[in-house]
Image (spheres, rainbow, N blue to C red):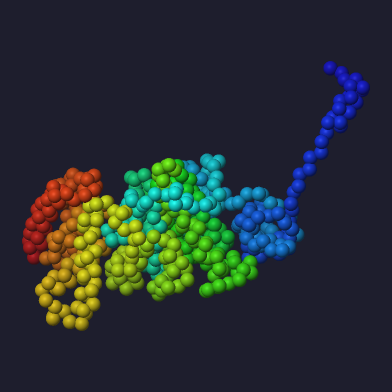
Amino acid sequence: MVLRPEEISSILKKEIETYEPQLEEVNYGTVIQVGDNIATVYGLSTAKAGELLEFSHGVMGIVFNLEEDTIGTVILGSDLLIKEGDIVKRTGKIVEVPVGPELIGRVVDPLGVPLDGKGPLKTSKTRPIESVAPNVVERKPVEVPLQTGIKAIDALVPIGRGQRELLIGDRQIGKTAIAVDAILNQKGSDVICIYVAIGQKANNVASVIETLQENDAMKYTIVVAASANQPPSLLYIAPYAGCAMGEEFMYSGKDVFIVYDDLTKHAKAYRELSLLLRRPPGREAYPGDVFYLHSRLLERSAKLSDDLGAGSLTAIPIIETQLGDVSAYIPTNVISITDGQIYLDNDLFYQGVRPAVDVGLSVSRVGGAAQIKAMKQVAGPLRLELAQYRELAVFAKFSSEELDKASRDQLNRGERITEVLKQKQYTPYPVGQQIAVLFAAVHGYLDDISVSLTGKFQDDFLRFMKNRYADLERLIEDKKQLDQELSDKLTACLDEFKKTFVAGIETKQ
């Protein structure tokens, strides 16, 4: 087909007549100062707080300070490629992370970039790291227990699905170990776990990942790692990124358990960013909004109403104290936000009581509502026995000879209960086994056993129960309460085992 010149001119005239110019406004800014992962940008008058900005070489940043002529921006990643005079563009978005079941079993950084060498994430779904917490109407009471597998916690400081329970104590006394034990105990349940490492040494994070892999726990776990060598901006967004990943499952009707390890380093990263941005310092040089930093994160943990799918997000934030000082700024802030705290004591740890849970200072504000009835039945007497033991132990330090028989018996039982609550690392106990062991302790089956043999008694009894009364543990977990029939069966099991155990000791002697 050959077009004639007059046809071409008519087509051009028609196009010119119908042409309507389209203007696209692009708001650019210019970097006027950069350093310490902070960039000061001139221009971008329409930028909003929290918005994502794009620098040269694909580096992103978050708007933190909105000043009269400039914007203070926190750079996500290295600032080595950014220099003065570079052009900065708005994206119109806030920070988002990839979410979905494809993340389970993966190790990612706070931006969702894989760190495990298993290739890119096969998910196209994203979620903003900041979101509004569910309101009162969208929640329901915390009633379903989240078993940690740790006797001292499940019996005395119970955690429910949807709760926020603080784990607090000095460094190197087992905070991470308790959190990892709780993750290991979710094996075989429907709970998805997320471990957020904030400012931890890279080899410590690698050790946790290795433990999870060895115990086959990575099948239901996501690890979000912001190591100590990462910029403070990534440490700052890490817990929010982990929370967003958990919320995706929660709003899908699933139960999620998330550990923030730890929020002390998170607050320090935020303080560093704030001071670099010239924000006015307050108490301990933290900015005035440091309370809001953690409250808006932890309030997102909830047990959703049935209308929203009844999913839950349970949080264990970890806080590190200095010489047991819980009255410092960040510890008191987080204590006031959470639904209770598990306090780890230095003295108990060095006395060999591990996990070093101080049951006197630890508390769960959800309490028995997050326990099955069988656990409440043994935990009530247990709590009373321990309280009386602690009170008597103070007087016994001065003179144990003047104590009457009842007081001495109380001390003996308290010592054995304390011994029973000790637990080896990475060996969580199913709830049926916990109840059986604690039933034996509060009903005096250990009173005439040497304290040094308490651990052996416990291990041998659980082995005996599994071999001779195979259905007993399952019955406890299914019935969820110790009725007369089940109590009688448990008593018969203990009586039979006690005879063989005592006979075994006498034979050795």
- Compared to residue 79, the image places residue 411 above or below, namely below
Quarter of the image that includes the N terminus: top right
Along the line of sight, which residue is nearer the eye, 138 or 228? 138
Answer with left or right where residue 4 lies relative to residue 498. Answer: right
- Compared to residue 5, the image places residue 502 above or below, namely below
Horizontal and vertical percent position of residue 19:
83, 33
Horizontal and vertical percent position of residue 378:
21, 57
Answer with left or right where residue 314 lies relative to residue 501. Answer: right
Quarter of the image that includes the C terminus: bottom left
Please name the residue shown 24% across and 44% down the image.
478
Instruction: Tell me, yes or no, if residue 59 can be seen here.
Output: no
Please name the residue shown 76% across and 47% down the image.
25
Instruction: Tell me, yes or no, if residue 7 can be seen here.
Output: yes
Horizontal and vertical percent position of residue 67:
69, 63
- Compared to residue 358, the image places residue 142 above or below, namely above
Please name the residue shown 53% across and 73% down the image.
283
